[in-house]
Amino acid sequence: MSAQFKSVLASFSKPRHFLQNIYAVADARMPHHLVYMRNHKAACTSVILSLMKHRATLEGENVDDLNIREVHGRPAGIFVDVKALGGPASHDLVQSPESFTFSFVRHPLERAASAFADKVAGSPRHRAKIMRTIGKSGADDITFPEFIHALTTNPAALDLDRHWRPQHKELASGLISYDFLGALPNMDRDLPAILTFGFGAGQNAVADARDAFGHKTRSKDLIDELSSTEKSAFEEVMAQDYALYEDALGAAFTDGP
């Protein structure tokens, strides 16, 4: 195992998360192989579903009937089986000159609000987990300002779950060389171009998980609940993510890396 790969694994809270984040499509019929590094709560389901639909088209298949668990489970024959490939070889795949490795970054506070709505307010299991981490009963409720306070004052709470864990860690930023790292507000512009780059002319349709699986959260309403002090504290703790997001905002994909 190379020192560089060890550094990549160290960026994740659990080493297996590295493999779980890789969604690679590689086929001789494709102009370019695509490797998407999943970033939770940054339209990851839409990106994965889009890759699946175009990859299935090559085989004359249809994936419209898959549920969200099956989509995230990397169906056989659609994505490269990185688990069978193993960690070092998968790392080589991600960094290969023959792979186009990409992802998208979301505004940190919007991502935290989405994670809260979906995985805390909307999931008793996740809510109990963070409540125990901050020393409260798993049966207690938690507001969004209280959640943000926990993330800004308790490192264990911040690192607890991939859906709100810092994006620069989840993407191993600075350790993985990305061919493109875009910002979520520009995904409607950039993802079709990436799909065309990978699958060929005319293959640029983006699948919207919000329509397919009802993925919608009330991020703006939650953010409005925060005071300026709470927002500032969050920005300070998430400074690296804010810098990553600002850099991504300035990136644009047109016809190649």
Image: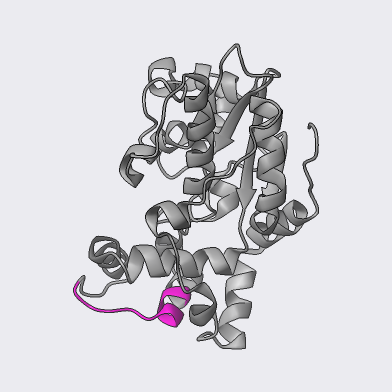
Q: How is the image coloured?
A: one colour
Q: Is residue 177 visible?
A: no
Residue 44, position as x, y percentages in the image: 51, 47
- In-front residue for pair 68/157: 68
- In-front residue for pair 137/51: 51
The answer to whether residue 170 is above or below residue 195 is: below
Q: Which residue is drawn at 56% across and 47% down?
A: 169
The segment highlighted magenta reads: 139-148
Q: In this view, does 221 lie to the left or right of 157?
A: right
Q: Is residue 82 left or right of residue 7?
A: left
Q: Which residue is drawn at 53% across and 63% down?
A: 111
The answer to whether residue 96 is above or below residue 162 is: above
Residue 234 sits in quarter: bottom right
Residue 124, position as x, y percentages in the image: 24, 66
Residue 61 sits in quarter: top left
Q: Can residue 100 be seen in this view?
A: yes
- In-front residue for pair 47/11: 47
**Where's the C terminus, which quadrant?**
top right
Q: Which residue is drawn at 66% across and 63% down?
A: 239
Q: Is residue 242 left or right of residue 37?
A: right
